[in-house]
Amino acid sequence: MNSTSNEPIALTEALASFDALWSPRILARVNDYDVRVTKVRGEHLWHVHDDTDEFFLVLDGELRISLREEGGERTVVLPQGSAFTVPRGIEHKPSAPSGAAILLFEPAGTPTVGDRHEEIPDHVDVTTGHALR
């Protein structure tokens, strides 16, 4: 599978092509943005993207995103088919206790751990996205 292909990409096939968790694959490039898919389970880490928003679309399962905002901390729950954008500069922590498959849309080269973050656990891949094979 090639992320620069002029052919349709089946999301189920793209997701079936890898098993790693918290390790996004670049599905396509739209102008200067990556469309990434990833599988997640458990918790990511608290992090911030200083200069870019981060878009999440839940393809399967349920994703939770904890946010530390001016008014305090809250958690957004996203069931399958739901989308949410974390605004730039907001500290957030995605999690999926039962697992989820998600699509992310963010500028190419954006690291998965943001610009500022807590200590990176072993199960989180520090990447700007891997090629979809």
Image: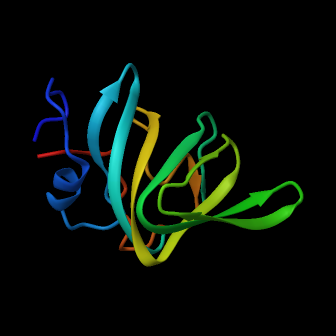
Identify the residue at image location x=10%, y=41%.
Answer: 1
Q: Is residue 78 left or right of residue 90?
A: left
Q: How many marks?
A: 0
Q: Is residue 31 left or right of residue 66?
A: left
Q: Is residue 100 visible?
A: yes
Q: Nearer the viewer, residue 30 or 112?
A: 30
Identify the residue at image location x=89%, y=59%.
Answer: 71
Q: Position of residue 57 (x, y in %)?
A: 48, 50
Identify the residue at image location x=36%, y=74%.
Answer: 122
Q: Is residue 55 left or right of residue 60?
A: right
Q: Position of residue 7 (x, y in %)?
A: 14, 28
Colouring of the image: rainbow
Specify the farthest residue to the front: 81
Q: Quadrant of residue 34?
A: top left
**Figure check: 95 above or below 35:** below
Q: Is residue 112 left or right of residue 72?
A: left
Q: Quadrant of residue 100?
A: bottom left
Identify the residue at image location x=76%, y=66%.
Answer: 74
Q: Is residue 128 visible?
A: no
